[in-house]
Amino acid sequence: MTETFTLTFPVSPLVGQVLLAAIALALTTGIAFWVLKKVRPTPTSSNALTLLQAFALIFAPIWTLVLGGTLWNLWLLFTEGGSVLKEAQGLGIGALIAALLGSPFVVWGTILKQKTVDFQKEGHITDRINKAVEMLGAEKTVKEVVPGENGKDTSVERTVPNIEVRLGALLSLERIAQDSTRYDKGRDHVRVMEILCAYVRENAPASEAQMSLREKWVLWNKSTTPENQNANTDYFVKAHALKDVETLHRETNYASVKKWSTSLPKPRSDIQLAITIIGRRSASQKEIEAVWLAGESNENRWPFSVGFAEQDAAKDHLGTYQGYRLDLRHSNLQAIDFKDLDFAAARFDYSRLDAANLWRCHLIGCLFIETSFVGADFSQTKLHFSQAVLSNFEACSFNNTYLDDFSPIASEYGGAAFRNCRPDFGLGWMIAARNTFADASVKLLPDVERPKHWPDWELTEFHDNSFHTQYQKWLANPDAYTPPPPPHH
């Protein structure tokens, strides 16, 4: 048996009609607000201003009807017709009409006030950016004691970057980018990223990067002719204070390159902080970058997340990506810590990332042209859909590295170590693999022959047959290295 009951609200029909009208007005205003946000997105307008515009849009036809009705009844009143105003008692109807007629001006005044507030906010953010940029150029004078001409120490003054002030400026810019993302649809986020990237390029140019003796030797050989090879070799040996040619060969092998990469100095703290700030952007900030140039659409959302990059349709989206890309070209990023940072879609052309710590770094969809990674650690790095042209990966470590659709073209891998990954680099890899080290955990394409010096079983983590130990033995003397036999079970 079904029981029914009735709820009775103590309101008159007129009040009920007013409530229904108010609810209808609120709903239509909400719909108009949603339409304005989707159809006409304006990064500079706030939600409050858009809501006022939606309310004005819905109220405009109502106000037009009220204005027309009022004018018509005024005409009837003065022409002695049957006007509602003539039959109304008291001032209530007049006050109501006056309020309705004046409401557009109230709404317009509110919109103007909201615009004023928005302009003040924009001006405040601009002032914050200008102040932070000014602090990025802060310098200080330090005194140093140097030997004088007469053998006595002399005190001299030198201007150096004020690192403490610059660190504060970098953190201020990070906060500005975060606030911009939360409150004004990221209008200034990309500009802050451009400032940070420019700061890195200007304060750590690739021209100031250190070069290994092997790199100098390779460049020297490229500039000489075969006829003058011996004479030029002798000149190079003397110019670099080497004992003989044998010493030159020993100091330019892969083991020496690996050792050189571990001796690189740590980067300046402000450069490291700038890289860290760029790499720890939130998902909302990256969404803003995706629509920065292409406009807002579902096809141009941030396509570089790991889950998306592993999908079959990812390549098409990555190929049509038109959003903002981090620009770190021609930068000296030697020994920089990129661990757990996201630099997807970035450009590193002609940059130096030797000895960089790239543990779990997202480098999906990046472009590397003549980029140097000597001795870099790519453990668990995501390199989906990235391209490397004429780049140097000598003595690098690739452990559990994601290499799906990674396309290195005419690049060097000598002395590199691969483990638990699949370097499907095409036919060119057949030659390059001869100068690398790996074990049975590395899977090659069927038509790629495994080098004979690669152990045919998966090496252990510890003891004499650990991967690291065997790699160091091969690195020290590749020609004499013999892989260890598999353990007997």
Image (cartoon, grey):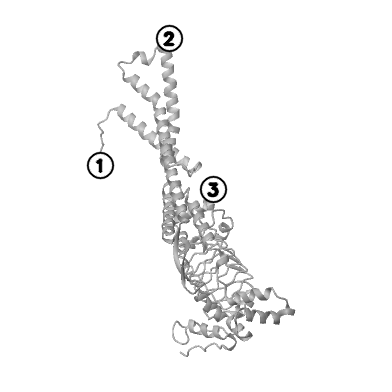
Cβ atoms under marks 2 and 1 closer than 8 Å: no
Disc 2 designates what residue?
Answer: 79
Helix, strand, or loop for circle 1? loop
Q: Amino acid at mark 1?
A: Glu
Classify residue 412 by image quadrant.
Answer: bottom right
Check the picture and name the quadrant holding the N terminus: top left
Residue indicated by mark 3: 295
Q: Amino acid at mark 3?
A: Gly
Q: Mark 3 or mark 1: which comes first in sequence?
A: 1
Q: Position of residue 207 (x, y in %)?
A: 58, 65
Disc on the earlier residue, 3 or 2: 2
Local crowd at mark 1 within 10 Å, few (<14), some, or many (≥20)? few
Residue at the image point whose x is 46% and y is 56% from the top? 136
User: Can residue 420 be seen by looking at this rendering?
Assistant: no
Classify 171 as above or below 26.
below
Q: Secondary structure at mark 3?
A: loop
Seen at 41% across and 23% down, the residue is 66
Residue assigned mark 1: 3
Say which label, 2 or 1, has the lower sequence index: 1
Amino acid at pointer 2: Thr
Seen in the image, is 58 located left or right of residue 89? right
Real-space Cα separation, disc 2 to disc 1, in angstroms: 60 Å
